[in-house]
């Protein structure tokens, strides 16, 4: 009988020692992981995750508490849970073909109470939250433009508003439709301006303020000098866009401008959380200034493309720092009534 008691006491002692060791040296977090396959380039995905703003919701009840840090291909962001507990969300991004693979790990720090530490086995609060969190991350990342901003060169500049005479129209995004709209504007607008005693005072500008029913809606016209007309049967007067802009010099064809400029820039804006990728109506106001004949086959080969800045661009310049302002390539004067004057832009220091 005595030996049985001693054996039981030894077993109890061993259990207590193991439990104590587990308490002091075992995991102090409850965690769950899942892997997502994302149909977007890894650099765009990594940038989007790394720039998630403080206060953003990972899933209901879990909020980003501090700015994320990046170590190679891994993004770590401190989070807080609804009950005040702390933890982290960790994303590890790797290329997977033309897309990417994202390992999502949600962690919750456990308290000093031994009963709390038992949640290591169950996953704590993160267990029931993980599936919903992963679904939200997957939806967000797959809404990104299927493009990479790597290699995109832009500068930050300031532009001033100028009196602007324009006509409005909408077209599809195909190169033929856009070139047709521009060609008609070059022919039709100058005579209307002359009839209103307005003098062309700059190069042709196309402003794209919005997307309507999948079509690009333009304001196409020229800066002007002269007294603003009191009434117009054809055309409108206003101001060209102004303020801080992201400026790209483009020397390709109309056919490739979406691929080479607009898609990469949209990917950069979305990655920096400066544009909602799921709603094209939220796109920034953009405009183009043509420095050659935009009616030539294939469209303008010498233009500047501007994105009018909205909000703080610190995240954007951190993800993809701006380059030195590029010069507009020299070109023969366009066969229009537009003087070959350079766009009124001045470099602006990038937001650190």
Image: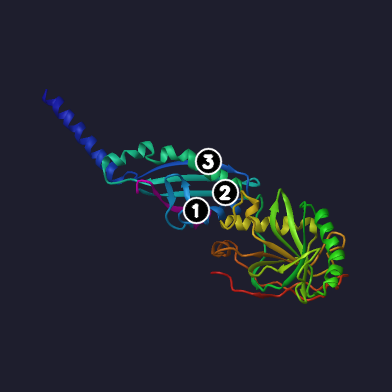
Q: Is residue 283 left or right of residue 203?
A: left
Q: Is residue 55 above or below residue 231?
A: above
**Is the residue marked by circle 1 packed among few (<14), some (14-19), or many (20+) residues within 10 Å?**
many
Is the magenta region chiefly helix, strand or loop? strand
Question: For the residue carrying disc 3, how many other residues have a C-alpha within 10 Å: few (<14), some (14-19), or many (20+)?
Answer: few
Residue at the spot x=76%, y=76% of the render? 227
| Closer to the camera in the image, 20 or 206 | 206
Residue 298 percent location from the top left of the image: 84, 59
Q: Is residue 78 magenta?
A: yes
Q: CA distance from mark 3 to mark 1?
A: 18 Å
Helix, strand or loop under label 3: helix
Question: Does dot 1 land on a helix, a strand or a loop?
Answer: strand
Q: Earlier in the sequence, mark 3 or mark 2?
A: 2
Classify residue 153 by image quadrant: bottom right
Q: For residue 117, what is the image quadrant?
A: top left
Q: Position of residue 244 (x, y in %)?
A: 62, 69
Residue 308 falls left or right of residue 85: right
The circle on residue 135 is 3
Q: Residue at x 54, y 65 (%)?
A: 314
Q: Which residues are magenta?
A: 70-84
Q: Please tell me whether mark 3 or mark 2 is closer to you in this view.
A: 3
Q: Which residue is mark 2?
A: 94
Image coords of residue 122 (percent x, y): 37, 36
The number of numbered badges drawn on the structure is 3
Name the residue beneath numbered marker 1. Answer: 75
Looking at marks 1 and 2 on the same chain, the residue that comes earlier in the sequence is marked by 1
Say whether residue 151 is magenta.
no
């Amino acid at each position: 009988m005595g030996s049985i008691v001693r054996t039981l006491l030894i077993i109890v002692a061993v259990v207590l020692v193991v439990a104590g060791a587990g308490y002091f040296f075992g995991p102090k977090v409850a965690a769950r992981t899942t892997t997502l396959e994302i149909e977007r380039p890894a650099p765009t995905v990594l940038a989007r995750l790394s720039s998630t703003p403080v206060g953003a919701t990972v899933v209901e009840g879990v909020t980003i508490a501090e700015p994320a840090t990046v170590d190679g291909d891994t993004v770590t962001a401190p989070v807080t849970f609804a009950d005040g507990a702390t933890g982290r969300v960790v994303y590890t991004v790797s290329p997977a073909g033309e897309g990417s693979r994202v390992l999502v790990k949600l962690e919750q720090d456990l308290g000093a109470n031994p009963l709390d530490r038992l949640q290591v086995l169950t996953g704590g609060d993160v267990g029931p939250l993980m599936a919903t969190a992963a679904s939200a991350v997957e939806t967000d990342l797959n809404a990104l433009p299927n493009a990479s901003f790597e290699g995109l060169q832009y500068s930050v500049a300031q532009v001033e508003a100028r009196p602007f005479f324009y006509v409005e129209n909408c077209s599809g995004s195909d190169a033929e439709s856009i070139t047709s709209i521009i060609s008609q504007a070059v022919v039709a607008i100058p005579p209307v301006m002359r009839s209103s005693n307005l003098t062309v005072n700059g190069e042709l500008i196309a402003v794209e303020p919005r997307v309507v029913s999948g079509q690009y809606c333009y304001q196409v016209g020229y800066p002007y000098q002269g007294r603003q007309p009191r009434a117009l049967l054809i055309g409108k007067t206003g101001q060209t866009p102004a303020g801080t802009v992201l400026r790209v010099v483009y020397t390709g064809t109309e056919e490739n401008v979406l691929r080479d400029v607009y898609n990469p820039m949209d990917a950069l804006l979305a990655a920096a959380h400066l544009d909602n990728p799921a709603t094209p109506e939220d796109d920034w106001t953009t405009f183009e200034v043509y420095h050659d004949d935009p009616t030539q086959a294939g469209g303008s080969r010498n233009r500047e493309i501007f994105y009018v800045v909205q909000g703080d661009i610190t995240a954007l310049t951190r993800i993809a720092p701006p380059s030195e302002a590029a010069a507009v390539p020299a070109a023969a004067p366009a066969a229009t009534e537009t003087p070959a004057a350079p766009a009124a832009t001045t470099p602006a220091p990038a937001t650190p």
